[in-house]
């Protein structure tokens, strides 16, 4: 589904592999007036029953777009550098430091590998992290990380 409505944020999932996470993020996108971008390759089909189960019966409400590759995403969306926020455990700045604005692109990598090194090279100043206190925990669940970020952005924009 695609909508022309201006989203509060653009949630971009680069090569997600767990359909349940993407289903939950789809539901979050619908609930929070965000557009969800899937960047291939995907580790599942968009018709996957786990994706649908996690998103419940809300999929008709999800404003989403599928891009064949990262390059295709950049070509279609043409996001300004300052409107991009990459999320990585390698980010040096907190997600609280993101200069959130409507239409912001929030970029998340695969659950298993995160974002590839070329993302870090291309956008070194746009990397952010969500703090994790326990050094034995490598990362947060993708759906949780997206939810934390979207609602912090909404808070900063006064949209609660």
Image (spheres, rainbow, N blue to C red):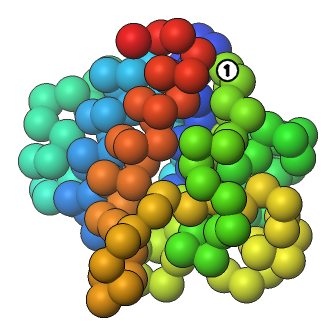
Q: Residue furthest bottom?
A: 136
Q: Visible in this render: residue 39?
A: no
Q: Residue furthest front?
A: 133
Where residue 13 sits in the image (x, y, percent)? 52, 57
Residue in front for this viewpoint, 100 or 103: 100
Where residue 136 sits in the image (x, y, percent)? 30, 89
The residue carrying mark 1 is: 102
Relative to 71, say whether 75 is above or below: above
Quadrant hosting residue 126: bottom right
Where residue 67 sits in the image (x, y, percent)? 63, 53
Quadrant of image for the C terminus: top left
Q: Residues within 10 Å of mark 1 (few under 14, many from 20)?
A: some
Q: Label 1's element?
A: loop
Q: Visible in this render: residue 93?
A: yes
Residue at x 42% of width, y 48% of height = 146
Residue at x 67% of width, y 30% of height = 100
Residue in front for this viewpoint, 157 or 57: 157
Where residue 110 sits in the image (x, y, percent)? 47, 73
Residue 61 relative to residue 72: left or right:
left
Residue in front for this viewpoint, 145 or 80: 145
Relative to 146, say whether 35 is above or below: above
Residue at x 12% of width, y 36% of height = 56
Quadrant hosting residue 46: bottom left
Residue 84 relative to residue 144: left or right:
right
Quadrant of image for the N terminus: top left
Relative to 70, say whether 105 is above or below: above
Residue at x 19% of width, y 40% of height = 55
Residue 18 relative to residue 150: left or right:
left
């Amino acid at each position: 589904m695609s909508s022309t409505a201006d989203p509060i944020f653009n949630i971009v999932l680069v090569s997600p592999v767990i359909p349940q996470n993407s289903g939950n993020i789809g539901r979050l996108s619908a609930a929070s007036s965000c557009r969800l971008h899937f960047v291939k390759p995907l580790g599942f089909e968009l018709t996957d029953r786990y994706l649908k189960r996690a998103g419940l019966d809300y999929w008709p409400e999800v404003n989403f777009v599928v891009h064949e590759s990262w390059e295709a995403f950049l070509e279609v969306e043409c996001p300004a550098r300052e409107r991009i926020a990459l999320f990585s455990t390698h980010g040096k700045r907190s997600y609280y430091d993101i200069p959130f604005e409507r239409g912001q692109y929030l970029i998340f990598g695969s659950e298993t590998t995160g974002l590839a090194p070329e993302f870090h090279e291309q956008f070194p100043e746009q990397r952010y992290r969500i703090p994790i206190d326990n050094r034995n925990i490598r990362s947060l669940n993708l759906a949780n990380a997206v939810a934390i970020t979207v609602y912090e952005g909404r808070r900063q924009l006064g949209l609660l």
